[in-house]
Image: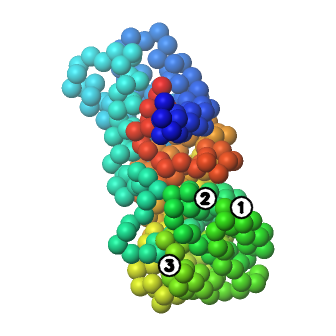
């Protein structure tokens, strides 16, 4: 087996292991729902609906999946419970694929301009700064020159943590003193990155301000100041969510989507939870591509999200 094959095998093993708790939970419930049944009927569909809702797929997305299966049952007249797994797999894969336009197949970035600027948002505790560090590692490994901006100046620990990641990965971190204006940090970061011909910039931001208006104003100010250096910045606003919080992650996503335009998602901590179904619901309801998933503590454990690989691992 070549080096590429070994890498893919390791990636698949990490994904399978990371989704193990979700898989056991979903299919344990599904097995109980269809026990003793041979045909997919209204009772089986009602039980399946409960399985999906209690697996953190979310009510609206669950209803959509059930309706699609009902159409299939009505068209085919007879669908056995043994076929249900494949049908469910097909419908979930279809839903995920619909919302993945703009997602990455590799760690390359657009080549028409640089630096490519990613503004990273999310509440405290979701793994935002760690995700930035892991992304910096992956981009650097792919041959990119990476700059990090420590614009979460409300928490001393956030700046310190980002600096630790910068040293660990070997990339430049731009920071100011505690309590400094986050927009000023963003301005300095982009100015330095542009002057040093960087390929990609990742800007950390405050996880929580006192209210929605405060958060909206802060993010708008950071964006406006960025445009003084690079008119098209940011190229991407990435929301980081903690997958282990299930429907709370979905509520956070809705709140952030209400105050700023989210263009991509990173969902962390999927390895320690049975709530991996939340990926399906968030992707469907927000109509925003899931770009990255976190499946462990190691730097290699942040993976590019691939909807086909995700569904295959979930249903194997």
Q: Residue furthest left?
A: 75
Residue 193 lies in what quarter of the image? bottom right
- Could you say which is closer to the camera, residue 30 or residue 307? 307
In the displayed structure, 239 sits above or below 177; it is: above
Identify the residue at image location x=35%, y=35%.
91
> Of the numbered discs in the image, which one, if any, rests on residue 168?
1
Q: Which of pointers 1 and 2 lies earlier in the amino acid sequence?
A: 2
Left or right placement of residue 75 versus residue 135 in this view = left
Q: Residues within 10 Å of mark 1 (few under 14, many from 20)?
A: few
Q: Are marks 1 and 2 in contact (CB under 8 Å)?
A: yes
Judging from the image, what secondary structure is the residue with disc 1 in? helix
Confirm or deny contact between disc 2 and disc 3 (CB under 8 A). no
Alpha-carbon span between mark 1 and mark 2: 9 Å
First-in-chain label (2 vs 3): 2
For residue 101, which quarter of the picture?
bottom left
**Residue 197 marker:** 3
Asked whether, in this view, residue 67 is left or right of residue 230, the answer is: left
Image coordinates of residue 39 in percent, x first then y, are 35, 14
Residue 80: image x %, image y %?
34, 15
Place residue 289 in its image quadrant. bottom left
Task: Indicate whether 207 appears above or below 22.
Answer: below
- Relative depth, front residue between 2 and 277: 2
Q: Give SS at disc 3.
A: loop
Can the viewer see residue 17 in this picture? yes
In the rendered structure, which disc, 3 or 1, sits on the residue that comes first in sequence? 1
Which residue is at a point 37% across and 58% down the rendered structure image?
A: 102
Q: Secondary structure at mark 2?
A: helix
- Residue for badge 2: 137
Tell me how far mark 3 sits from mark 1, CA to CA. 21 Å
């Amino acid at each position: 087996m070549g080096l590429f094959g070994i890498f893919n095998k390791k990636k698949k093993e990490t994904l399978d292991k990371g989704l193990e708790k979700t898989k056991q939970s979903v299919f344990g419930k599904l097995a109980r729902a269809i026990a003793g049944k041979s045909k997919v009927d209204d009772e089986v569909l009602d039980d399946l609906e409960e399985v999906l809702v209690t697996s953190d797929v979310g009510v609206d997305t669950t209803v959509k999946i059930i309706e699609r299966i009902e159409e299939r049952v009505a068209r085919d007249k007879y669908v056995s419970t043994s076929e249900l797994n494949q049908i469910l797999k097909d419908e979930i894969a279809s839903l995920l694929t619909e919302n993945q336009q703009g997602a990455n197949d590799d760690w390359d970035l657009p080549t028409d301009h640089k630096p490519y600027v990613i503004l990273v948002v999310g509440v405290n505790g979701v793994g935002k700064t760690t995700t930035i560090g892991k992304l910096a590692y992956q981009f650097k490994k792919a041959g990119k020159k990476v700059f990090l901006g420590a614009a979460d100046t409300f928490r001393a620990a956030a700046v310190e943590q980002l600096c630790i990641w910068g040293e660990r990965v070997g990339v430049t971190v731009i920071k100011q003193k505690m309590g400094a204006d986050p927009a000023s940090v963003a301005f300095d970061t982009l100015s330095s990155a542009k002057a040093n011909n960087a390929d990609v910039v990742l800007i950390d931001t405050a996880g929580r301000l006192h209210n929605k208006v405060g958060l909206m104003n802060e993010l708008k100010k950071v964006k406006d100041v960025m445009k003084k250096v690079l008119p098209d910045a940011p190229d991407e606003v990435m929301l980081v969510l903690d997958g282990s919080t299930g429907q709370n992650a979905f509520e956070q996503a809705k709140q952030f989507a209400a105050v700023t335009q989210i263009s991509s998602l990173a969902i962390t901590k999927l390895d320690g939870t049975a709530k991996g179904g939340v990926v399906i619901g968030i992707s469907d309801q927000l109509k925003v591509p899931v770009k990255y998933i976190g499946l462990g503590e190691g730097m290699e454990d942040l993976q590019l999200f691939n909807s086909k690989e995700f569904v295959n691992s979930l249903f194997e």
